[in-house]
Each structure stands twice: as structure tokens, then as C-alpha cells.
């Protein structure tokens, strides 16, 4: 059988796939394709615009193949010859291009072998009434054996039926149904899923998404860790959790426990960063509507404890949202950072780099910096140098890297000697 030619996924098909894929996968793709960054405006294609075929996209070590194809109701899937299907016998039938109309086949055989990928010669021997084992016997090798002649005649009948089937197939299109096939190939194995395509494409892809990825209609936050927070422990600092919404993936008891803790701490203005661990990036999510005391959890001032700097590097995706009126990156904070580093034994030249891959977070922090230094515009690269004593200063730089990720926010702090031209 001819090998299938692999085609790259086109723009329209990729939009359909991304609309209903896992949110982690969607964000992963959107960072590499700037035109697909705004996922909210992606509209699924209409069914009549979908081209029949298979399209693939590779994400890390996983290959996703999505195709819409016609499945004929009365066509047998013959893919291999008899010899390749663990069948014994001297009669070798090549079934690659052989077909038989179901109306010409006994009902019992049809029902039993409708969707069988591997056929036994018993299907043909029981129908035509000849014994394959007898054909294999050395004593029956003579061309004058009447049984062999009868076998050859019946093989000619099979060829005639094949010709009749081909003629009928070309004249009368057999009934078919549309199917969506999704193939997910991982190093551990390959999974295939088939779904009916008897509705709109959006409904069909919703069913595909529900089957593969589970019930995740609003997949914004996937995991919550409640064990890392002690109710009796006072939080060290404050921060903003902006527009948080839970999904059906999170257990109901965890949602209720989280809401209870929010109600307990929101009126104090304190909220622990270690309490909420988000494993996936997210951009725009809804408010905590179930929290009665306030719609959002705000912070307007970072306390003197600077553990929030170290916590940035410990977060896998560094999803941090800060309020626009938060006082960050002030000279006082720089001095506190310097004193903390010196207490830890760090010398001049030590630096830390924190990467924030969330585009919205980077833009918000740049907006904060712009307001604090009273500038009209912050370029992609921005820096500030603050003296901390007579010999040293702390240099803080901010820039957005477009090379690897679509947006990668870099916050870099470094203790450097005071330049000669510094006043």
C-alpha cells in the first residue's frame, strides 16, 4: 500500500484545532504563531469549508492528526493480502483492491465480517464450497485433478464478481457517513478516536475535545494545592489575584475550601502566594463572583519582606498579576534588596534573572514602571540604576524578548560598582 504523504497543517485547519484543544497546547502554539495569539476571536470554520484530508501538527513529543473523511457503509476495509494475515493455505488472494457488494454476499457472512480487518479463508471456502487443505496436499498437485479445476473455475467467478462490483460502484455511489478521526501519537503509544460528523463542525469538535481532554469548558486553572498553606500562619506579603475562575476539572470541595479562605483573608488585605499554585498560563479570566466581600483581591503595597523576589524564580510559569497602583521597583526596595543580598553573602556582580512568560503580566508591569518614572512610553528595554552606598549600586533592567517566546518578560537585578559619571 502506498505511503501517505504528510501535509503540514494550514492556517484555517489550525484555527479549528486550536479552538478546541487543551489550553496548555493552545497557548504553546499561540506563542509561536503571532497571528493566532488572540484566541478569543478565532471562529470555527463552517463544515462546507473543510477540506477532506488529514492534517498534522507536532507539539513537543506529541503529534496531533485531525481529519474528516467519508466512511462508506458497505465497503470492506481490505488492506493486506491473505498471506500477511496469519492465514494458511496454498491459495493466495490479494485483497488490496478486491471488493464485493454486500447484496451479493450471504447475510450471515455479511453480518459476521462487515468490519473485520483480517479475513479468514473460511469466509470464501464456506461460500464457494471448496477445501483449501485439499488444494495444499501434494497428491492434489496434478493439473488433472477435478477439484483443482473446480477451484480455478470458482476463482474466475470471484474475478467476475469483482468486476461487477467495480461497475456498480462507479455507476451508483454507495451511501457513506462523515467521520472525524483524531490520532494522538506519543512515545508511549498511539490513540485513535472516531466521531460522527452529522452536525456542525463546532459541535463535532466539542465532542472530540470532551472525549480526549475531559470536561473543561472553561479551562483556566487546572490544579489547586491546599496543603501548602497553613491557616494559622500569617502571610509574608500581599499580591493581586486578578479575575480567577474555576473549572469543572477542579473538585467541588476544593473550590469551596478556596472560597472560604478567600473570605477569611480578603478583608485583611492579605493573601498568601504559596497558597495558589497555577500550573498553566492564563490571560483573561472572570472575577471571583462567589466571594461576597469583594470582587477582586487587591494589594496596594508590598511589605518590607522581599521574599516575593525569590518566589518569582520558583514558579514554573511565573504567573503573577500586580495591581497598577502597587509600589514596586522603588529606590527603597532596591536598597532593601541590596541589604538582603549582602546579608546572604553575595558579592558585587551577582545577578538574578526572572522570566515572566505571560504577555499580559509583562505589559502590566511595564505600565507600572512607566507610571512610576513619569514617562510617556516604555520601550522594549528599560533600566534603572540606584545607588545603595558610596561604592555600589543596584542595576535593574526590564526588557521583552521576542526570540524564543512570543513575549518573555525579563526582570534582571545586578549589583554593580557605581559608574564614574553617576551623580
Image (spheres, rainbow, N blue to C red):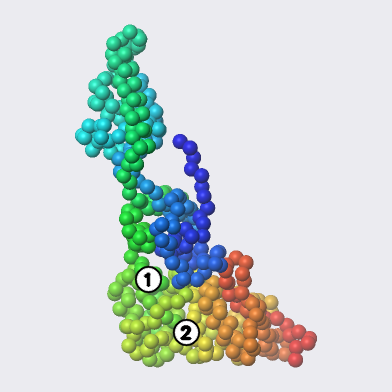
Residue 327 percent across, percent down from the top left:
55, 90
Q: Quadrant of the N terminus?
A: top left
As drawn, the residue found furthest toward the front would be 171
Q: Residue at horizontal 30%, vertical 20%?
A: 154
Residue 250 vs 383, above or below: the answer is above
Residue nearest the observer in this picture, 190 or 377: 377
Residue at point 44%, 73% (across, down): 278
Which quadrant would residue 398 be assigned to in this image? bottom right
Q: Categorize mark 2 by other alpha carbons within 10 Å: few (<14), some (14-19), many (20+).
A: many
Given this view, does label 2 or label 1 mark the residue nearer the observer?
1
Residue identified by numbered label 2: 239
Q: Position of residue 17 (x, y in %)?
A: 44, 60
Quadrant of residue 85 within the rendered picture? top left
Apparent side of residue 348 relative to residue 4 in the rendered image (left or right): right
Number of marks present in the image shown: 2
Residue pictured at 43% horizontal, 56% vertical: 50
| Position of residue 126 measured from the top left corner of the image (x, y, whole percent) | 24, 26
Per the image, the residue denoted by label 1 is: 218
Q: Residues within 10 Å of mark 1 (few under 14, many from 20)?
A: some
Q: At x 31% / y 10%, what residue is drawn? A: 145
Q: Is residue 343 left or right of residue 253?
A: right
105 w.r.t. 178: above or below: above
Label 1 sits on a secondary structure element that is loop
Q: Can residue 340 be seen in this view?
A: no
Amino acid at each position: 500500500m502506498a505511503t501517505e504523504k504528510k501535509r503540514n497543517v494550514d492556517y484555517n485547519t489550525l484555527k479549528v484545532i486550536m479552538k478546541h484543544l487543551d489550553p496548555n497546547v493552545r497557548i504553546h502554539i499561540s506563542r509561536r504563531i503571532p497571528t493566532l495569539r488572540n484566541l478569543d476571536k478565532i471562529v470555527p470554520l463552517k463544515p462546507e469549508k473543510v477540506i477532506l484530508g488529514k492534517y498534522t501538527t507536532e507539539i513537543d513529543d506529541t503529534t496531533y492528526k485531525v481529519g474528516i473523511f467519508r466512511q462508506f457503509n458497505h465497503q470492506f476495509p481490505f488492506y493486506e493480502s491473505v498471506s500477511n494475515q496469519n492465514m494458511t493455505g496454498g491459495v493466495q488472494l490479494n485483497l488490496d483492491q478486491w471488493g464485493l457488494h454486500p447484496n451479493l454476499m450471504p447475510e450471515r457472512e455479511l453480518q459476521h465480517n462487515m468490519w473485520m480487518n483480517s479475513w479468514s479463508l473460511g469466509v470464501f471456502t464456506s461460500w464457494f464450497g471448496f477445501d483449501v487443505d485439499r488444494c495444499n496436499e501434494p497428491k492434489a498437485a496434478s493439473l488433472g485433478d477435478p477439484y483443482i479445476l473446480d477451484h480455478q473455475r470458482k476463482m474466475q467467478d470471484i474475478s467476475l464478481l469483482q468486476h461487477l462490483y467495480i461497475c456498480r460502484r462507479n455507476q451508483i455511489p454507495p451511501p457513506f457517513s462523515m467521520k472525524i478521526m483524531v490520532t494522538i501519537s506519543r512515545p508511549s503509544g498511539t490513540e485513535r478516536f472516531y466521531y460522527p460528523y452529522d452536525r456542525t463542525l463546532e459541535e463535532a469538535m466539542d465532542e472530540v475535545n470532551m472525549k480526549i481532554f475531559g470536561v473543561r469548558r472553561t479551562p483556566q486553572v487546572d490544579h489547586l494545592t491546599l496543603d501548602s498553606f497553613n491557616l494559622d500562619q500569617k502571610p509574608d506579603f500581599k499580591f493581586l489575584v486578578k479575575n480567577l475562575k474555576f473549572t469543572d476539572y477542579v473538585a467541588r470541595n476544593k473550590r469551596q475550601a478556596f472560597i472560604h479562605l478567600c473570605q477569611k483573608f480578603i478583608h485583611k488585605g492579605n493573601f498568601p502566594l504559596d497558597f495558589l499554585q497555577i500550573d498553566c498560563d492564563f490571560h483573561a479570566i472572570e472575577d471571583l463572583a462567589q466571594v461576597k466581600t469583594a470582587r477582586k483581591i487587591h494589594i496596594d503595597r508590598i511589605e518590607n519582606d522581599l521574599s516575593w523576589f525569590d518566589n518569582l524564580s520558583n514558579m514554573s510559569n511565573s504567573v503573577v498579576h500586580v495591581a497598577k497602583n502597587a509600589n514596586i521597583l522603588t529606590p527603597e526596595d532596591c536598597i532593601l534588596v541590596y541589604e538582603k543580598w549582602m546579608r546572604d553573602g553575595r558579592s558585587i556582580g551577582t545577578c538574578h534573572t526572572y522570566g515572566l512568560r505571560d504577555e499580559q503580566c509583562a505589559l502590566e508591569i511595564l505600565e507600572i514602571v512607566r507610571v512610576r518614572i513619569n514617562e510617556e512610553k516604555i520601550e522594549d528595554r528599560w533600566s534603572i540604576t540606584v545607588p545603595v552606598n558610596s561604592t555600589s549600586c543596584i542595576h535593574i533592567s526590564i526588557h521583552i524578548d521576542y526570540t524564543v517566546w512570543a513575549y518573555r518578560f525579563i526582570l534582571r537585578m545586578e549589583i554593580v560598582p557605581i559608574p564614574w559619571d553617576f551623580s
